[in-house]
Image (cartoon, rainbow, N blue to C red):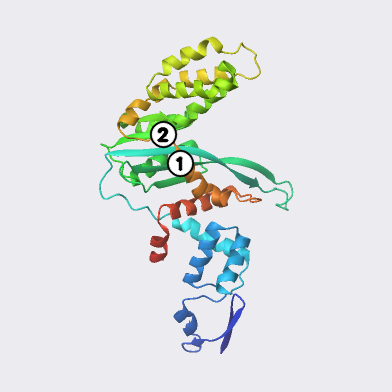
Amino acid sequence: MNWQTTFGKVELEEQVLRLGRRGVRLRPFCLKAQVRPAGYSRPLERALSDFGAEESFGRAAARVQEHYGIEIAASAIRRLTYAHARKIQAVAPARPTQPAQTLITQMDGSMIPLVKPGQNGDRRQGKTLLWSEARLCCARPEDRVDRVYGATLGTLETVSLMWRQTAQYGGLNEKTFVHGIGDGAPWIVEKFNDNFGPQGKYLIDFYHVAEYLAAAAPKIVGPQKAAGWLKKQKTRLMLGQAGKILRTLEPHREAPGTAETPIEDAARYIRQRLAHLHYPQARQANLPIGSGEVESGHRHVIQHRLKLAGAWWTQTNAQAMLGLRVARANNCWNTYWSAN
């Protein structure tokens, strides 16, 4: 008995054996090659998922043909990539051999494009395009450069749980001091306090505060003197003299009803976050004062794949791709394929 299966554009004639008249059917070639009829070998599935995690599925199909000489539909690469993306999220990152004495953790949000399909039969009709915030966090011991990442499109409660779990993978225990950094978004500060408040301190990203002051500078001293004025205020920030900055801003605050209020915005931003501007203590402890680590993570973990030109995602598929990208960033890729 003969059986034909298609592998890309390669057709193979396969011998199929049966144990007895109605017994189990045996396929020696499939067993030896570790493939399924109309399926793919594990090494090929790995390669397809690898390309699909980094490129658009159409571009991934072109690369497979270029490197392996196999023509595979983009839809097949899409299906396999999502299937492995959902499975790989169960692989936990390797924990440090010792708990961290000081843990550095950061959190930030990044907007990605989503689409809600139409509801009236044709899902292409009446679809809604929107932007949704993907929250990314990272954590590492202060004496290491390798970070553990977490990302989700879920609710703030999901974000909070993810942040705690990511910190634990980074080396958090009950005695660890947690140094948190990020912008002044209230939800970030709230979730940091929920998870680490008793054993850590949250610091507002220095450069984020400086941006508010930079916007106010031309209004106070004029464009030509703005750079010198800003340098002086940044020095005050570094010395823990936020009160002096507020007193400098006070006489120049805009009148109520003014269309643009950069001075009032800067004063309000600093006044509401005085407890989180401890730059002298952070510098004395050789701890970072900027959130560049998580901002860099946005680019290479999230945006590299999920913000490709012309790409729109359903929430389910976007979350799966986020999980895959995070797993790769956390060095879970080889572990997953070795175990499967």
Instruction: Return the mark for residue 181.
Output: 2
Pointer 2 local density, CA inside 10 Å: few below 14, some 14–19, many at least 20: many
In the image, 73: left or right of 110?
right
Q: Which residue does the image show at 53% across and 60% down from the upper left?
A: 81
Q: Are marks 1 and 2 in contact (CB under 8 Å)?
A: yes
Q: Quadrant of the C terminus?
A: bottom left
**In the displayed structure, does residue 178 sit left or right of residue 151?**
left
> Which mark sits nearer the N-terminus, 1 or 2?
2
Residue 166 visible in image: yes
Is 275 rendered above or below residue 159?
Answer: above
Residue 272, can we see it? Answer: no
Per the rendering, the mark at residue 294 is 1
Badge 2 element: strand
Horizontal and vertical percent position of residue 261: 60, 18
Secondary structure of residue under mark 1? helix
Residue placed furthest toward the front? 224
Q: Is residue 36 above or below residue 102?
A: below
Q: Amino acid at mark 2?
A: Ile
Q: Which quarter of the figure has residue 10? A: bottom right
Q: Nearer the viewer, residue 151 or 100?
A: 100
Locate residue 333, reporting x and y percent: 43, 59
Which one is nearer the viewer's eye here, 123 or 318? 318
For label 1, count other residues whose C-alpha is less than 10 Å away and answer few (under 14), some (14-19) or many (20+).
many
What residue is at 43 percent from the left and 14 percent from the top?
244
Q: Quarter of the image holding residue 161? A: top left
Percent position (x, y) of residue 231?
47, 24
Q: CA distance from mark 1 to mark 2?
A: 9 Å
Q: Amino acid at mark 1?
A: Val
Q: Is residue 12 left or right of residue 165?
A: right
**In which quadrant of the rendered image does the N terminus lie?**
bottom right
Residue, x 73% and y 49% (percent of image)?
Answer: 120
Q: Position of residue 86 (x, y in %)?
A: 49, 56
